Amino acid sequence: MFQSFDVTSDPSQGAARVARLREWLAGKKLDGFIVPRADEHQGEYVPARAERLSWLTGFTGSAGAAIILADSAQIFVDGRYTLQVRGQVDPSIFSVQNLVETPPAKWLGENAPKGARIGFDPWLHTIAEAKALKTALEKRGAELVAVAKNAVDAIWDDQPAAPLESVDIQPLDYAGELAKDKLARIAESLKAEGATHTILTDPSSLAWTFNIRGRDVPHTPLALGFAVISADGQHLLFMDKRKLPRTTEAYLTQLSDIRPPSTLESEIAALAKAGAKVGLDQSLVAEKLRLIVEENGGTVVSFADPARLPRATKNDAELAGTRNAHRRDGAAVSRFVRWIETRPPGSVDEIAAVTALENCRTETGKELQMPLRDISFDTISGAGPNGAVIHYRVTTATNRTLGPGELYLVDSGAQHQDGTTDITRTLPIGEPTKEMRERYTLVLKGMIQISMLRFPPGTRGADIDAFARAALWKAGLDYAHGTGHGVGSFLSVHEGPQRIAKSGTEKLLPGMILSNEPGYYKEGAYGIRLENLIVVTEAMPVEGGDLPMHGFETLTLVPFDKRMIATELLTREEFEWLNAYHARVREEVGPLLAGDERAWLEAATSPFADHHHPSR
């Protein structure tokens, strides 16, 4: 079993831990401390050792921060977690702030006491974050103080050790490009920017560049480490050799010198003293690394992570792999949906559903000779009102039966060596209401509009986000999350820089994989989300048009529940897209199923009859 269900949060722990933290801060003559949910790599997925925000506050979400002052404590979460945070933190200790509208820097700029000394761990904040915090505090006559030891670590007596999981080589058949060629490309980009070195701190960039995968964080095949890439080809990889099997170590030794992580600071300091010009990504790299370079006489060059865009724009081998992964996943999830449909209402709970889905993926992987490596994140398995909690995580304490007349929202994904998947479907348990069907269909319309879109080169995610919301907006409805995030190739299920959201400023380039997941959430009643993965296609001429246009290819292959679709709300074009999509699911996934499961898929993907066809 990949998912644990005994992860509970005890809000009452917060009071004692915050009191201990304040006592430690007072001893260091600090008036406050900032606790982000981050590790030294600034990634969303962190090892147990770095779950400082969760340990201190009780909040288990994947994004957030806390600010602890002498007389108040704030916790910052985004729209995905506004319901979750209420049940996980002590409201007598923490005030909840909106992470997007009032991020920590803005809050401190408006509320920090004059003359206050606010501590922060420079390993856990990016260069840009630290600059924003420093500027905001200076306007208040306060000071940002870098600490040598993290304040939470100082009071966390049973803090887990750093992970030492083994590292594997990602074969060329799946990677599509040799690591030595990727390193040569990065070295050339350094020369073009006038830098002598750059530091890869994002574990996804490290994995992509060196064609390696690891097991250091839950559900994402990352090996934690750092790399110093040099324009002259003399690269350094900082990774504990206890994580490297003999074949992996021999492979990596051909690409770089392997150094102990404990020597990272001294090695960078030595390069800086020798006059290095170090390219650092201001939005990804820890402030600590900037300090080391500049305090030792080196020069920091503002430089985007050179692996980020190449990693995001998948090559032919990666795209072939993800298509294969999605066919298998389509078979597994279709099996699961049939399983849910054939259970009597009230006979399955959220945990049993997650376990059944994992079993479907495991068995399908075995049958098709591509073993399931892991799930790609903890499955969101929400029945009834739990489905309205956008990033709900089922535990033994919250586990709920899928009751008759309710909706069941299941958002899940798989990690296969050839691709990462992420899919959401919303299923009726028994008979759905008219309102449920109408709102499901409005969400479906938004997904189809994104799927059919044609857009000129240079278009950003922010430029198209509204297409997914237009039908909901017309009905006075919306959802409090982005429409799509980037997805890696047997890497992170949340990959930057591409996204479809109001804040999606990156141009959408061919080969970028994104999710397409509009939703609607009625607090206390039900949630609806529909998600397919899509990939940006090459710009193609449009008949009669003046400009070539990009589009999207849909990767996910699982039917939508026809009982939930009010076809009279679909335009003719949307209706035709839906029938064509179901025909493709039947054609590509059908051969992977047999017997009753094949018959179920045939019925689930059969075209709507003519009399359902909308007139417009």
Image (cartoon, grey):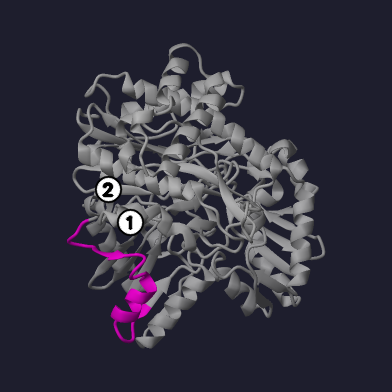
Residue 406 got which mark? none
Who is closer to the viewer here, 383 or 230? 383
Farthest top residue in view = 595
> In the rendered view, would you say 97 is above or below 222?
below
> Where does residue 511 sit, x and y in percent of width and height?
63, 49
Distance in Å between CA atoms under marks 1 and 2: 9 Å
The residue nearer to you, when weighing 153 against 126, is 126
Q: Is residue 450 visible?
A: yes
- Counting from the top left corner in percent of width and height, residue 319 is at 64, 41
| First of labels 1, 2 by sequence position | 1
Where is residue 245? Give x, y as percent. Answer: 69, 37
394 to the left or right of 134: left
Q: Can you say whether 55 is above or below 460 in the image?
A: above
- Disc 1 target residue: 480
Label 1 secondary element: loop
The structure residue drawn at horizontal position 31% and vertical position 30%, both measured from the top left corner, is: 563
Q: Residue at x 45, y 33 (%)?
A: 579
Q: Is residue 101 magenta?
A: yes
x then y, percent, for residue 239:
65, 51
Quadrant (top left, top right, bottom left, bottom right) of the C terminus: top left
Identify which residue, 38 or 115, lies in the foreground. 38
Disc assigned to residue 521: 2
Q: Residues within 10 Å of mark 1 (few under 14, many from 20)?
A: some
Could you tell me which residue is drawn at 29 percent across and 19 percent down?
343
Residue 547 colored in magenta in the image: no
Q: Amino acid at mark 1?
A: Ala
The reply to whether callout 1 and callout 2 are in contact (CB within 8 Å) is yes
Type of the residue with mark 2? Tyr
Task: Report how many numbered discs are placed on residues in the image.
Answer: 2
Residue range highlighted in magenta: 90-117
Mark 2 nearby-residue class (10 Å; few <14, some 14–19, many ≥20)? many
- Dividing the picture into quarters, in which one does residue 139 lie? bottom left
